[in-house]
Image (cartoon, rainbow, N blue to C red):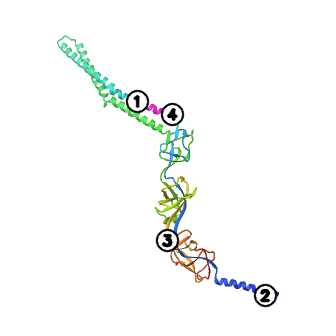
């Protein structure tokens, strides 16, 4: 009751008590959250977003100028090799094929004519010319005899000689014509050249007609349809883009700091963002030889042996890649490691109520935990991340947290 009569004295005593409590707390040091270094199994993983890679992306272009008559496919449609995709106006090209076929038929007929009719005609002409020559030569011999006897005039003898020359010339011409009509003769050669030329023109016309039809060169999926019926297109204009069927692949671009941990043959688990509950297997098979210096990342490709049916080209995926595993190693929460990105990381431990520094060697980094290869014994009480400035030898009060 005396204290209430002297309020100033009560306040003074209270202040002394508070000061004593504060001084005692300071003497024992700040409270720090701690954890115990314990043995555990660790898996270091690289988790990255990526996409389904189109291994063969084919751009189908117009090979000739013309008007598009019909487009037989739409975006996302599956096509088979040989399917008609785009039809262009083929009236002019079709007429050119008909004309070329007629030229081939004409050239073939000429060769057949030389083979069957020409040989007979020229042979008969040569025989007739030989007969005429023989008769003219016989007439000339009689004329010479008569002229020598003085019975035949000189002019008649000259006429007989000219008849022989004419008959001989006709015989040579007939022989030449007969030779020309043989399979190795000039007429046959000319006719054969005409046939070859007409056949080449037919092949070119058929090729131009084929260019009016755009067909699928292999099985795949239409990614982009960039043409509509009625469009007039020019050579080289891209009409369709097709993802050809083949091996399913994923591509991710993890940070280059993970490069040392990633190797071909490593297994991964992946899922499409559109179907996150369906997990499928993948395997690393390619690591790019250079870093993307703009983003500081490395391109990594993975094969998918058994892709789910819903997987589509360019679909966004998440890839969980296990790059290292350790069993029964000493580990602590990653936030308890100081200077983890430096060449000399360390941890703070509580030993006999005071802070002690331990230089450590780090191993793999698992999910939320880091392996300690050396510098820290099992069971050590390690200080976790804190905003309080701590120095070696400082008194602290440990508050054990999650182990």
Task: Mark 3 or mark 2: name the one nearer the start of the chain.
Answer: 2
Location of residue 231 in the rendering, given as x and y in whole percent from the top left corner: 56, 40
Q: Residue at x 25, y 21 (%)?
A: 130
Point out the residue furthest to the left here: 149
The CA span between labels 1 and 2 is 133 Å
Q: Read off the magenta span.
A: 92-106
Residue on which the image places disc 1: 105
What residue is pinned by disc 4? 91
Q: Position of residue 313 (x, y in %)?
A: 53, 52
Q: Secondary structure at mark 3?
A: strand
- Is label 1 or label 3 in front? 3
Q: Is residue 228 magenta?
A: no
Q: Crowding at label 2, few (<14), some or many (≥20) Cα neighbours within 10 Å?
A: few
Q: Quadrant of the C terminus?
A: bottom right
CA–CA distance between discs 1 and 4? Answer: 21 Å
Between the residue at mark 4 and the residue at mark 2, the CA separation in whole angstroms equals 117 Å
Q: What residue is at 50 percent from the left and 73 percent from the top?
A: 328
Determine contact: label 1, label 4, CB under 8 Å.
Answer: no
What residue is shown with label 3? Answer: 327
Residue position for label 2: 9
């Amino acid at each position: 009751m005396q204290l209430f009569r002297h309020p100033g004295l009560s306040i003074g005593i209270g202040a002394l008590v508070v000061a004593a409590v504060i001084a005692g707390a300071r003497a024992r040091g700040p409270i720090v959250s701690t954890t115990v270094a314990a043995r555990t199994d660790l898996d270091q993983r690289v988790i990255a977003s990526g996409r389904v890679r189109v291994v063969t992306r084919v751009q189908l272009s117009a090979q000739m100028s013309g008007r598009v008559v019909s487009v037989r496919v739409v975006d996302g449609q599956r096509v088979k090799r040989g399917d008609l995709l785009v039809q262009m106006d083929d009236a002019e090209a079709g007429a050119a094929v008909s004309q070329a076929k007629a030229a081939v038929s004409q050239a073939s007929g000429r060769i057949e004519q030389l083979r069957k009719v020409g040989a007979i005609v020229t042979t008969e002409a040569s025989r007739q010319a030989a007969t005429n020559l023989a008769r003219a030569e016989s007439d000339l011999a009689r004329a010479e005899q008569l002229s020598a006897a003085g019975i035949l005039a000189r002019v008649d003898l000259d006429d007989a000689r000219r008849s022989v020359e004419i008959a001989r010339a006709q015989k040579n011409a007939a022989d030449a014509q007969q030779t020309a009509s043989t399979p190795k003769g000039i007429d046959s050669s000319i006719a054969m050249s005409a046939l070859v030329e007409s056949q080449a023109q037919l092949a070119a016309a058929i090729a131009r007609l084929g260019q009016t039809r755009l067909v699928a060169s292999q099985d795949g999926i239409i990614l982009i349809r960039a043409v509509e019926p009625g469009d007039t297109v020019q050579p080289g204009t891209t009409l369709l883009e097709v993802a050809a069927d083949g091996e399913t692949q994923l591509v991710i671009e993890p940070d280059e700091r993970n490069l040392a941990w990633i190797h071909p043959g490593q297994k991964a688990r992946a899922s499409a963002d559109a179907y996150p509950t369906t997990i499928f297997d993948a395997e690393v098979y390619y690591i790019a030889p250079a870093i993307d210096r703009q983003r500081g990342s490395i391109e990594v490709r993975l094969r998918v042996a058994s892709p789910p049916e819903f997987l589509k080209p360019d679909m966004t995926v998440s890839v969980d890649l296990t790059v290292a595993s350790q069993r029964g190693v000493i580990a602590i929460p990653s936030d308890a490691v100081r200077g983890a990105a430096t060449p000399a990381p360390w941890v703070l431990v509580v030993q006999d109520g005071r802070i002690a520094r331990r230089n450590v060697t780090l191993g793999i980094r698992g999910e939320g935990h880091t392996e300690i290869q050396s510098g820290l014994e099992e069971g050590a009480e390690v200080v976790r991340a804190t905003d309080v400035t701590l120095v070696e030898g400082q008194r602290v009060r440990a508050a054990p947290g999650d182990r």
